[in-house]
Image (cartoon, rainbow, N blue to C red):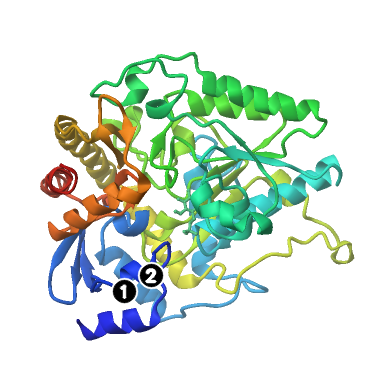
Amino acid sequence: MHKLAQLDHKFIWHPFTQMREWLRHEPIVIVRGKGAVIEDVYGNKYLDANASIWTNLHGHNHPKINAAIRRQLSKIAHSSALGLANEPASLLAAKLVAAVNPRSGISNPKLGKVFFSDDGSTAVEVALKLAYEFTRRTRGPRPEPRFISLQNAYHGDTVGAVSLGHIDLFHKPFAGLLFKTDTVMAPYCYRCRFNRAKPERADARDYRKCNWECISKLEQAFARQRKRGNPYAAFVFEPLIQGAAGMIPQPAGWLQRAAEIARGHGALLIADEVMTGFGRCGVPKSEIRTTKSEILFASHHENVQPDFLCLAKGLTGGYLPMAATLTTQAVFDAFLGEYHEFKTFFHGHSYTANQLGAVAALASLEILQSAASARARAQLEQALRHELQNLWALPQVGDIRQVGLIAGIELVRDWRTREPFDLRDRAGWRVCQAMARRGVITRPIGNVVVLMPPYCTTAVQVRKIVRALAQSIREALA
Ligand SMILES: Cc1ncc(COP(=O)(O)O)c(C=O)c1O
């Protein structure tokens, strides 16, 4: 075993990993990367088909982001945001405000205030605490503000974010630590009990037969809570597609309707765009033949502007841990007061507004907003859509769900019955292991294989990824 792998085995505890299992095999130790390819200590090369857990946008070792970090390093790496401002964070905040307000622009933005933190969980945690306190200050402290999020929601691993989560496997063990939130039916057309359509070899959103019962359930949940005299303070959701829930996309129109209902019942909207942000959900049709790249966030694909927008993962192009929670002037104003009134938002992290992270984010945004990037993303989306069609030939492929540059392939025993694999069979895991042997790295969510390549991935590389997946399904599940 390589010396570095031995050190890993001796000292490191990996996230979301059964360590007994981990210790049985020599791990892949990554030492370098370029574009969509990462390389291990032995010189083996792999396509990074999940963009290093959904973070990387433009590829590894990008010359522009590297140069920006180097330039900043020669000045200063970090200074505290508690009591000090800094150059790149100020510039980044202005750029983010412009990017998340594509319609109103920077002069009259709805989301005009940026609170920096470190990762997706803390971005959500900040939104949660701000929404909680804002509600108490505007509606009165009693009854306690209450939150609602979607079935199978995942918003991170800090205690507040876990309280909003509804994946029993991850969240139930910590029930005693959490505060109570409510959950409401989320669309999952492939497995929806209200979908009367028989399985077809197509995305279930396209052939579903239903009466939008998921929307009725949502409406009922909000109405019920209002009747109890404590309308929901906030509705927390991932727009267009739920990630860790199993790459579960919403049918067109769901988001807009859900947002209208929540607003109609007085709830704030908290959009968790930790995964979906920064162009992940594709180039909208209206921009495909233009040089514009204005719609970069999933909420805006359905014309929804939330009250809180949580960003992380792709913010720095996948280089450094940094997050941002954007919110409104009204929320900001609720925390203004004289010193002795103690209306301050008492929350923050040591590395808030980190200067290296901020320059990486500025460089990443500049690349993202170029016409070349929009073109490349549109082409990659098409290449992925084209290649994924080949997977319908496999009986163990039940559903293929693609939203922009995100794809989830749900594995089943037989597509005709939709019968799932028992989680103990580790079907997704075995397929991903077989893919790694073919030079493609990704990670499953239960029985769903995720493909989310960096935007620089070429059509040839996409073909290689999907071929490796098809061969691996045959090898591991036949
Ligand atoms: C939608 C969403 N929110 C929040 C998080 C938490 O982000 P982090 O792992 O950076 O804390 C994740 C992570 O996968 C996520 O997908």
For the C terminus, the quadrant is: top left
Left or right, 224 with respect to 115, comes to: right
Mark 2 near ligand 1 (CB under 8 Å)? no
State the image coordinates of residue 246 (x, y, percent, origin top left): 39, 42
Q: Nearer the viewer, residue 158 or 329?
A: 158
Q: CA distance from mark 1 to mark 2?
A: 6 Å
Crowd around label 1: few <14 · some 14–19 · many ≥20 (10 Å) = some
In which quadrant of the rendered view does residue 442 lie?
Answer: bottom left
Task: Name the spot of residue 238 as percent of width and height, x first.
Answer: 50, 41
* Badge 2 density bin: few <14, some 14–19, many ≥20, Cα 10 Å: few
Q: Nearer the viewer, residue 416 or 208?
A: 416
Q: Tell me which residue sits at (36%, 61%) in the image.
A: 318
Relative depth, front residue between 401 and 80: 401
Front-most of 181 and 9? 9
Residue tagged 1: 23
Do residues under tags 1 and 2 come within 8 Å of each other at their CB atoms?
yes
Is 22 on the left-hand or right-hand side of 321?
Answer: left
Extreme right residue here? 340
* Residue at screen point 52% across, 64% down: 118
Q: Is residue 336 visible?
A: yes
- Judge whether 91 appears above or below 131 on screen: below
Q: Amino acid at mark 1?
A: Leu
For image coordinates 28% across by 36% down, the residue present is 412
Which image quadrant for residue 205?
top left
Image quadrant for the N terminus? bottom left
Instruction: Give above or below for 146 relative to 63.
Output: above
Q: Secondary structure at mark 2?
A: helix
Q: Which residue is mark 2?
A: 19
Residue 470 relative to residue 355: left or right: left
Tally of marks = 2
Q: Position of residue 421 (x, y in %)?
A: 31, 41
